[in-house]
Image (tube, rainbow, N blue to C red):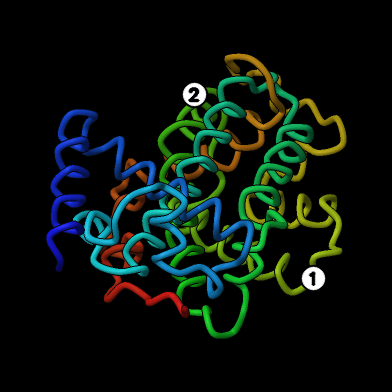
Amino acid sequence: MGSTETSTVFADRANDAATGASTRRDDIVEAARELYEERGLSRTTVKDITQRVGVTRSLFYHYFSDKDAVTEAVLDDIVEDFLEALRYWNAGRERGNVDKALTDCLRIFRNGIFESGSFRRSLANTENSALYLHFVQTVSDRVARYIVDSTVRDFERFHNVEIEHVYETFYMMIVGMTGLIRANPQISDDVVKRIVAQTLHIEGYLGGGTQGTGLAGTGAGTAHASASASTGTAHASTSTGTRTSGSNGTRRADERGTRPRAHS
């Protein structure tokens, strides 16, 4: 490393200390995400990312060991955005309107996982299949845990939960929906909604059914009823130790082995 580059690195790190390490790291993740969406994963290099942020490669490697590491951070960022959309949906659920709730939730699901940016498309490529699987596992785990800890608990306050092993049921359902929609993107939300309702034993809430009128929603969405309904079962399972049980073999995605590598 030459003296000029060394001075630049020291200046970057000094500026980083002044502005906050997390801010600079976030800038790098944001730049990587923008470039992945614009160009796709394989066409983006570490050099592209550092040039977009305006930092040296050395500072990049101060935060991330390689492109795979920043790609994982981007995936975490996307998952967090998806969860934030679910929190908003959950807070605005309309009491008893399960049908609309499911419809709204499926729309969030399609947008969050199958958004038409270059990055989402490149994830689905064969060469990135391991990374895509890691993404789906992470989404399924965190979404299932969120629904079980929120919507299901609300639902079971007023209704019987008709399923067992609730966390595991939601996890498998999310993985299955992802595969189904990926293989058949033209499938209607109505069909997927009915599959979800059958899986969660809440068919009676669809089509304007009033079984869920006792739901204590906090606001908007049919989603609350639907999620609650589905989640309600989850909490029942939780009370018997099923939900959080890695003992049933459903571990968090980040505990399942080595991190998949991005194909660059």
From the viewer's perspective, tell me whether residue 26 is left or right of residue 175: left
- Residue at (37% x, 54% y) in the render: 73
Between 9 and 209, the residue placed more toward the observer is 9
- Is residue 144 visible in the rendered structure shown here? no
Which numbered disc flags the more N-terminal residue, 1 or 2? Answer: 2
Residue position for label 2: 157
- The image position of residue 225, as x and y in percent, is 65, 30
CB of mark 1 within 8 Å of CB of mark 2? no
- The image position of residue 79, as x and y in percent, is 48, 48
Quick check: 164 above or below 24? below
Amino acid bearing label 2: Arg
The residue carrying pointer 2 sits among few (fewer than 14), some (14 to 19) or many (20 or more) residues within 10 Å by Cα, namely some
Q: CA distance from mark 1 to mark 2?
A: 36 Å
Determine the image quadrant of residue 236. Answer: top left
Quick check: 90 above or below 77? above
Between 229 and 14, the residue placed more toward the observer is 14
Amino acid bearing label 1: Asn
Determine the image quadrant of residue 127. Answer: bottom right
Between 93 and 85, the residue placed more toward the observer is 85
- The image position of residue 183, as x and y in percent, is 74, 74
- Residue at (77% x, 40% y) in the render: 103
Residue position for label 1: 184
Placement of the N terminus among the 4 image quadrants: bottom left
